[in-house]
Image: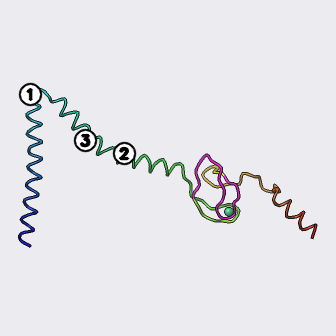
Amino acid sequence: MNEGFNRLLKYDFSGLGCWLTLIAFALLAGSVGLGWIINGFVILIVLSLLAPVVIFWVAKWWLKSNFIQDQCPVCDYEFTGFKNTEFQCPSCSEPLQIREGEFSRITPPGTIDVDAIDVSAQQIEN
Ligand SMILES: [Zn+2]
């Protein structure tokens, strides 16, 4: 266990040495007049660290503002719909769209679907 701790300590020191080398190199390069390279490098590192965070927050905001969770007005099945598109309820396959932040039927209430006419025609034949 002691040996493992020593190894860990050694590893930490080697990591620190690496950083010290980097800092020494940065100071040296800065004194020689290559400060702009170091600045560019640092900016690049900071950007590459910040970019995933920024992308994550933008994506989260975008998803929140474009996906609406609501209940189907026909069968009350709750699911998530995408704004500005027409979609179907996964439960009853009613065509829906988002209006004022809520799911609403594309076909106005009272409209008889072609499918419904087919069903009634079959009923008459029977
Ligand atoms: Zn439905």
Q: In whole angstroms, how far apart are the C-alphas of marks 2 and 1?
A: 35 Å
**Relative depth, front residue between 5 and 76:** 5
> Relative to residue 15, is residue 6 depicted above or below?
below
Identify the residue under disc 3: 45
**Residue type marked 3:** Ile
Q: Element at badge 1?
A: helix
**Relative depth, front residue between 111 and 19:** 19
Q: Do the residues under discs 3 and 2 have CB atoms within 8 angstroms?
A: no
Magenta extent = 80-96
Q: In whole angstroms, how far apart are the C-alphas of marks 3 and 2?
A: 14 Å
Q: In whole angstroms, how far apart are the C-alphas of marks 1 and 3?
A: 22 Å
Q: Element at badge 2?
A: helix
Q: Residues within 10 Å of mark 3 (few under 14, many from 20)?
A: few
Q: Position of residue 66 (x, y in %)?
A: 54, 49
Identify the residue under disc 2: 54
> Relative to residue 37, is residue 72 depicted above or below?
below
- Mark 2, mark 1: which one is toward the viewer? 1
**Residue type marked 1:** Val
Identify the residue under disc 1: 32
**Relative depth, front residue between 110 and 16:** 16
Question: Can you tell me whether the CB of the residue at mark 2 lies under 8 Å from the nearest atom of ligand 1?
Answer: no
Q: Position of residue 53 (x, y in %)?
A: 34, 48
Going by the image, does 35 lie left or right of 56? left
